[in-house]
Amino acid sequence: MRAAYKDLVTAPIRRNTDIAEAPEFGKTIFEYAPKSAGAQDYEALSRRVSPVSYTHLRAHETVLAHV
């Protein structure tokens, strides 16, 4: 697929239990396990797909951390 679509193909999101557990606690993967492989993969994807949205997300999380 990468050969045909080159830069449109992204790295895969690694599966881990943290991704499955986060919603059970009413949290995003970034809140529940920010250092997990899945969180890192989703963060890289969000930066690649939409740098502006990624910056907004990180700013929003910083504000929530101080509430």
Image (cartoon, rainbow, N blue to C red):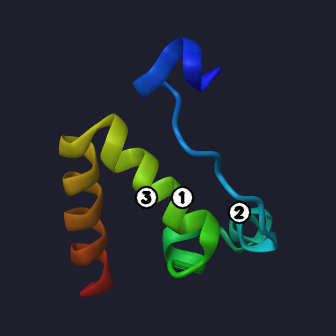
Q: CA distance from mark 3 to mark 2?
A: 17 Å
Q: Is residue 65 above or below residue 17?
A: below
Question: Which residue matches tag 3?
Answer: 43
Residue found farthest to the front: 3
* Nearer-N-terminus badge (3/2): 2
Mark 1, Cα crowd under 10 Å, few <14 / some 14-19 / many 20+, is some
Label disc, if present, on residue 23 of the rendered structure: 2
Residue 5's x, y, as percent? 51, 15
Amino acid type indicated by mark 3: Glu
> Between residues 3 and 38, which one lies in front from this camera angle?
3
> Between residues 10 and 45, which one lies in front from this camera angle?
10
In front: label 3 or label 2: 3
Q: In the image, what residue occupies the spot 42% across and 55% down?
A: 44
Quadrant hosting residue 57:
bottom left
> Between residues 25 and 56, which one lies in front from this camera angle?
56
Label disc, if present, on residue 41 of the rendered structure: 1
Q: Are marks 1 and 3 in contact (CB under 8 Å)?
A: yes
Q: Is residue 33 above or below residue 3?
A: below
> Between residues 39 and 57, which one lies in front from this camera angle?
39
Q: In the visual, does 49 lie left or right of 8?
A: left
